[in-house]
Amino acid sequence: MEEKIKEFVEIVEASENVVFFGGAGVSTESGIPDFRSTDGIYNQKYKYPPETILSHSFFLYQTEEFYRFYRDKMIHRDAKPSVTHMVLAELERRGKLKAIITQNIDGLHQMAGSKNVIELHGTVHKNNCMKCGQFYDLDYVMNSEGIPKCSCGGVIKPDVVLYEEGLKDQNLSDAIRYVSQADVLIVGGTSLVVYPAAGLIDYYQGKKLILVNKSATTYDCRANLLINDSLGKVFGALQK
């Protein structure tokens, strides 16, 4: 494994066009639970399955129950950027990393200092009134009782892509453009089972596809470099 990490460092250092595509595993090292692991949100017991609660229709018809779960399980205000977040931000400052494409909604990449972040599934830090479009920050949502309401009386909805909702066209097209033009594509901390996000790998045309994930994925056979280890350990090697 040490040889693979050494090769990872050499590839990244030799490139000026790196793109990173990451999932929940990027933020687990910041203390944010993922969805599908043994201890993940989807393996916990609730009144309704999390997939149901986090759907568009559930939000519309059982909004208060949605917000009870959302505030309790989806918001992690004490989380701080991990080593991976910080190293990615540094790679961007050095001009090597061109874009971060993330499935996460926590905003930790921006907190670490990254600028060009494509949030495929939205962010908890943006919330808008469904009636008039007025913007509200996370503090407003968290400090509201029950269903957060706009001054106009409309219901406020997080700018998060729920089940039954599609990805924003602009985010998807931007992600495809960066992936297709990348010299090095690093995919980390994702099980690659959520589509259409996982399908982004199909647009990569280079020969330096690096997969970093603790468990196996269906894309492992396509990787030019496969590292089954923690992201913190792998990216931490770039700090040395």
Image (cartoon, grey):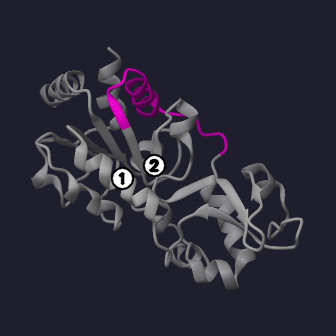
Asked whether 173 or 61 is in front, the reply is 173
Relative horizontal placement of residue 98, taking residue 13 as reference (left or right): right
Q: In terms of sequence position, does the residue under pointer 1 or pointer 2 come before the other?
A: 2
- Is residue 23 visible to the viewer in this orientation of the structure? yes
Q: Quadrant of the N terminus?
A: top left
Residue at the far top: name it.
Answer: 240
Bounds of the magenta segment: 77-98
The answer to whether the residue labelled 1 contacts the one labelled 2, judged by CB atoms less than 8 Å apart, is yes
Residue in the image at 65% along x and 40% along y: 78
The location of residue 223, given as percent across then percent down, is 13, 47
- Is residue 38 visible to the viewer in this orientation of the structure? no
Task: State the separation of the CA atoms marked 1 and 2.
Answer: 7 Å
Query: What kind of residue is marked 2?
Result: Ile
Alpha-carbon neighbours of circle 2 within 10 Å: few (<14), some, or many (≥20)? some
Residue in the image at 83% along x and 54% along y: 143
Q: Is the residue 172 above or below the residue 225 in the image?
A: below
Q: In this figure, what is the number of numbered marks? A: 2
| Quarter residue 111 falls in | top right
Relative horizontal placement of residue 93, taking residue 160 as reference (left or right): left
Task: Judge whether residue 73 is colored magenta.
Answer: no
Would you name the residue on which mark 1 appears? 175
Would you name the residue on which mark 2 appears? 118
Q: Is the residue 200 above or below the residue 42 in the image?
A: above
**Which SS class for mark 2?**
strand
